[in-house]
Amino acid sequence: MTTVLVAGGAGYIGSHVCKALAEAGDTPVCYDTLEKGHEWAVKWGSLERGDVGDAVRLDEVLSRHRPQAVIHLAGYIEVGESVRQPERYLRNNAAKTDTLIEAALRHGIEAFVFSSSCAVYGLPQMEFLAETHPIAPISPYAESKAHVERALAAAAGRGLRSASLRYFNAAGADPGGAIGEAHDPETHLMPLAVDAALGFGPAVTLLGTDYPTPDGSCIRDFVHVNDLANAHLRAIDWLRRSGGSSRHEAFNLGSGTGYSVRQVLAETGRIAGRLVPHAVGPRRPGDSPKLVGDIAKARRELGWTPKRDLAAQVEDTLRWRRMMPRQSSSGPEESEPQRQRT
């Protein structure tokens, strides 16, 4: 049994990671400010409120729980917002993570897994992005991720074994409906498309339809959140098996298949049984036309293979958005009125 500190464990991906850890017989400890996460999502393991930039609080929590591993998913995630507020992103995502890395070194953490992003590649120079692609971020969000990867590579020389998992587009929800995506405001395509189809939210805005792609919309690689969670567990095992050697490695986590925004809207409409209302807007600063991952390294080294395809991602998102807790003046409550509208 392994005790794992999950920074950002009350968030979308973090809560699924905590669930996967618990189901594997490990002990997750959720470390979260709850600025973006949700207390109702902490269903597996204890909750320790704290900021990854607070060295004193980190020392308290690490000393109390004595985890063998850290999974770091805490951070701001909106590319467009990062362009408008670059210093905020670099401070919160990059500088604060430096504090977490130092804490991990002080406490002899055996494995450190970082939630990175395919955004570090910038404008793609190959059809399928491999880990050997140049790192060339084109947004402050992406630069904050690249900064942490560099910091972890440097920390390997001081004894920290780490892996950066370069996510493509996380999608879907727990198939049992216990947890799922609940950002405020929501900015990700799939939940926005589902909400629009179900009448829970406004029409989806296509952020640019003049990209050099077959239908003019961006192409992205979507990977189910449960598959992502499983990869974190495999990364911890892989790092702990590395024995005395300190290293930092990066792994792409995607499906290896690209779908355009228009294709996702069409698939959502097909599964929901109703069209997804949408409008056309301008491009979003910092977006690449196409991001599709080469996941051969994760298959080979981690033994990881994604299981749930785009249709399953849409189906799980539909189920979750019908039943997810929604904010009221007194806090989260179940969305019975929304369920009746379906």
Image (cartoon, rainbow, N blue to C red):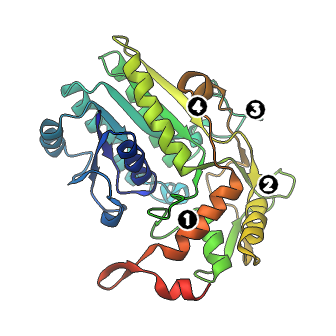
Q: Measured from the top left, where is residue 85 in percent x and y?
A: 44, 57
Task: Specify the quadrant of the image occupied by residue 20.
Answer: top left
The single residue placed furthest to the top in the displayed view is 244
Q: CA distance from mark 3 to mark 1?
A: 27 Å
Q: Which amino acid lies under the numbered mark 1 shown in the image of this protein?
A: Thr
Q: Earlier in the sequence, mark 2 or mark 1?
A: 1
Q: Which amino acid lies under the numbered mark 3 shown in the image of this protein?
A: Met
Residue 131 seen anywhere in this rendered image of the structure: no
Q: Which mark is residue 135?
A: 4
Q: CA distance from mark 3 to mark 4?
A: 13 Å
Q: CA distance from mark 4 to mark 2?
A: 22 Å
Q: Which mark is residue 211?
A: 2
- Regarding mark 1 in the picture, which secondary structure is present there? loop
Q: Residues within 10 Å of mark 1 (few under 14, many from 20)?
A: few
Depth check: give the residue in front, 70 or 52.
70
**What residue lies at 76% left-to-right and 64% top-to-bottom?**
267
- Regarding mark 2 in the picture, which secondary structure is present there? loop
Q: Which amino acid lies under the numbered mark 2 shown in the image of this protein?
A: Tyr
Residue bearing mark 1: 187
Task: Judge depth for marks 1 and 4 and give the one in front.
Answer: 1
Q: CA distance from mark 2 to mark 1?
A: 20 Å
Q: Measured from the top left, where is residue 296 in percent x and y?
A: 66, 27
Task: Judge depth for marks 3 and 4 and give the one in front.
Answer: 3
Q: Quadrant of the C terminus?
A: bottom right
Q: 171 left or right of 2?
A: right
Q: 275 left or right of 244?
A: right
Q: Which mark is residue 13?
A: none
Residue bearing mark 3: 126
In contact (CB < 8 Å): disc 2 and disc 1: no
